[in-house]
């Protein structure tokens, strides 16, 4: 697959007004080359407006959008060549056969005529459509139809893919297969992935942005190595004796006692300082105190927890 240009998508102070209502307000965002960005937000947050602006379907009331070096408003033709878009309802023609449809899209995307055949075969292999190229789109399952929708977004060698609720309506197996294709594409594409399925976003995306009332309220790197490690430990022992002992281990930045109902057991959340691995010190300390560790597991903040935490009080 021909790789996209080494570009970045940039929004600077983008606002969209409908009369006195602001669907987006002063949104600034950059997406570096090769990143998969998840776009999240409750209904009415402004996600659809943002996607419509990024695809050139809407003009912002103020602010600037650049796709690679091209201003989307001033250089729409050049900018839109870099974009592949799969909306929630894929733009398919059920009476057309898959290959004929992709040939049609390639011509719309100005692929050179002598390159169309090879381009279609390449896309079909990547999206798992090789065996159904001769079939009418209307006879395909929902999963395969969605793959055709993704294939049309890849026509013309775009470097930037926008996927809006791409697994909506798919069964779990179809959704898993589709996200595996997206992970393959992520090796050479910049992708904006909008979805309500938080576990799916967490598995696919490098970073998430959360919108609420038209504003960005959170921007989190999901692959960051700078996040502190957290350990959940259940220990046989009373808090009055356990907690002072745990505070003697300097590698623990924070110690939180979780409420528990089991007598003589304490469950604690241990936040470790950067680049420390205090497990050996913990085992040694508790062994000397005759407080066995009953359960010990790494604790990761789920995307679901992050989402509810940043939106619950807004």
Image (tube, grey):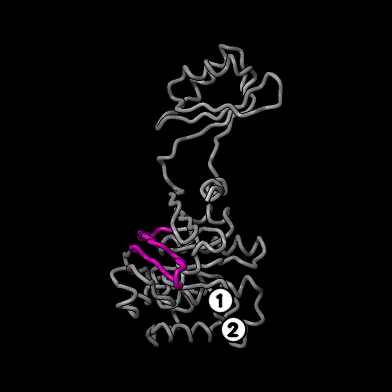
Label 2, secondary structure: give it: loop
**Chain part drawn in magenta:** 10-36
Q: Earlier in the sequence, mark 2 or mark 1?
A: 1
Q: Which of label 2 and label 1 is nearer to you?
A: 1
Residue positioned 46% across, 19% down in the render: 249
Q: CA distance from mark 2 to mark 1?
A: 19 Å
Secondary structure mostly taken by the magenta-highlighted segment of the chain: strand
Q: Which residue is mark 1?
A: 90
Residue 279 position (above or below residue 163): above
Q: Which residue is mark 2?
A: 134
Magenta-colored stretch includes residue 124: no
Q: Nearer the viewer, residue 116 or 247?
A: 247
Q: Residue 140: horizontal and vertical position, in percent?
A: 65, 77
- Seen in the image, is 67 located left or right of residue 133? left
Label 1, secondary structure: give it: loop
- Seen in the image, is 165 located left or right of residue 250? right
Q: Residue 236: horizontal and vertical position, in percent?
A: 65, 19
The quadrant of the picture occupied by the N terminus is bottom left
Farthest residue, direction front? 20
Residue neighbourhood size for the residue with mark 1, other residues' Cα within 10 Å, grouped as few (<14), some (14–19), many (≥20): some
Q: Nearer the viewer, residue 81 or 136?
A: 81
Magenta-colored stretch includes residue 33: yes
Residue positioned 59% across, 65% down in the render: 167
Q: Residue 146: horizontal and vertical position, in percent?
A: 58, 72
Q: Decide: marks 2, 1 in contact (CB < 8 A)?
A: no
């Amino acid at each position: 697959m021909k790789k996209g240009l080494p570009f970045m998508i940039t929004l600077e102070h983008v606002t969209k007004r409908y009369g006195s209502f602001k669907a987006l307000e002063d949104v600034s965002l950059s997406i570096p080359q090769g990143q998969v960005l998840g776009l999240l937000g409750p209904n009415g947050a402004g996600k659809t407006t943002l996607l419509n602006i990024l695809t050139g379907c809407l003009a912002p009331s103020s602010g600037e959008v650049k796709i690679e070096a091209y201003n989307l408003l001033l250089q729409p033709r050049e900018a839109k060549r870099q974009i592949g878009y799969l909306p929630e309802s894929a733009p398919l023609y059920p009476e057309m056969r898959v290959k004929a449809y992709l040939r049609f899209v390639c011509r719309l995307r100005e692929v050179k005529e002598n390159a169309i055949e090879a381009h279609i075969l390449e896309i079909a292999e990547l999206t798992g459509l090789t065996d159904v190229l001769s079939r009418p789109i209307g006879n395909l399952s929902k999963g395969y139809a969605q793959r055709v929708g993704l294939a049309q977004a890849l026509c013309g060698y775009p470097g930037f893919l926008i996927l809006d609720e791409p697994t909506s309506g798919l069964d779990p197996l179809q959704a898993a297969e589709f996200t595996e294709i997206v992970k393959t594409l992520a090796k050479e594409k910049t992708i904006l992935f909008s979805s309500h399925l938080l576990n799916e976003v967490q598995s696919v995306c490098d970073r998430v942005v959360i919108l609420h009332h038209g504003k960005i309220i959170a921007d989190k790197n999901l692959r960051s190595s700078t996040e502190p490690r957290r350990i959940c430990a259940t220990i046989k022992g009373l808090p009055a004796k356990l907690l002072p002992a745990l505070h003697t281990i300097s590698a623990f930045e924070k110690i939180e006692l979780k409420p528990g109902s089991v007598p003589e057991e304490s469950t604690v959340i241990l936040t470790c300082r950067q680049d420390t691995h205090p497990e050996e010190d913990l085992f040694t300390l508790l062994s000397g105190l005759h407080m066995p560790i009953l359960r010990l597991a790494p604790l990761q903040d789920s995307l679901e927890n992050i989402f509810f935490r940043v939106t619950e009080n807004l």
